[in-house]
Image (cartoon, rainbow, N blue to C red):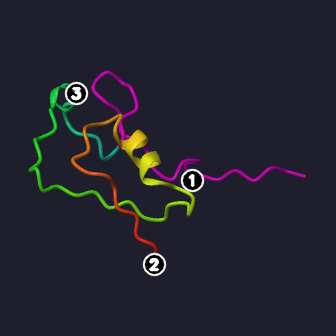
Amino acid sequence: MAQLKSNRPRKPYARPRGSDGAWLHDRAPLSSAKANSAIAPATSANAKLVVSNLHYEITPKDLVSIFGQIGTLVREPLIRVR
């Protein structure tokens, strides 16, 4: 049986390339050096983090050990059961 050939490209679109020829994500910032040197802005002391969909056996001590790796917690986490 003869193979059918198509004039269509095999890829739906051409992937963007960086100036050095490496593949570049289409939502990547224009300057990777600028992104690497950016420092996260300081947040206020009133900043809160809501974490949902936790396993029912998670304890405040577990959350302190997990989030304590990132920074100091002002108070023990509250777990609310809905």
- Look at mark 2 in the image and give the residue it sits on: 82
Q: Nearer the viewer, residue 2 or 27?
A: 27
**Closer to the N terminus: mark 1 or mark 2?**
1
Left or right for 81, reference 73: right
Left or right for 19, reference 25: left
- Look at mark 3 in the image and give the residue it sits on: 36
In the rendering, at what x and y percent does residue 57 appear? 57, 58
Disc 3 to disc 1, C-alpha distance: 39 Å
Circle 3 crowding by C-alpha within 10 Å: few under 14, some 14–19, many from 20: few
Q: Residue at 23% of width from left, 29% of height from top?
A: 32
Give the answer, above or below, for where 37 lies relative to 3.
Answer: above
Q: Residue 52: which numbered mark, if any?
A: none
Disc 2 to disc 3, C-alpha distance: 40 Å
Left or right for 49, reference 80: left
Question: The residue tagged with tag 1: helix, strand or loop?
Answer: loop
Q: Residue at 80% of width from left, 50% of height from top?
A: 3
Question: Of helix, strand and loop, which mostly describes the magenta segment?
Answer: loop
- Within the image, what quadrant is residue 55 found in? bottom right
Left or right for 44, reference 20: left
**Closer to the N terminus: mark 2 or mark 3?**
3
Disc 1 to disc 2, C-alpha distance: 54 Å
Circle 2 crowding by C-alpha within 10 Å: few under 14, some 14–19, many from 20: few
Q: Amino acid at mark 3?
A: Asn
In the rendering, at what x and y percent does residue 21 appear? 36, 24
Circle 1 crowding by C-alpha within 10 Å: few under 14, some 14–19, many from 20: few
- Look at mark 1 in the image and give the residue it sits on: 8
Give the answer, above or below, for where 21 lies relative to 71.
Answer: above
Q: Residue at 30% of width from left, 47% of height from top?
A: 27
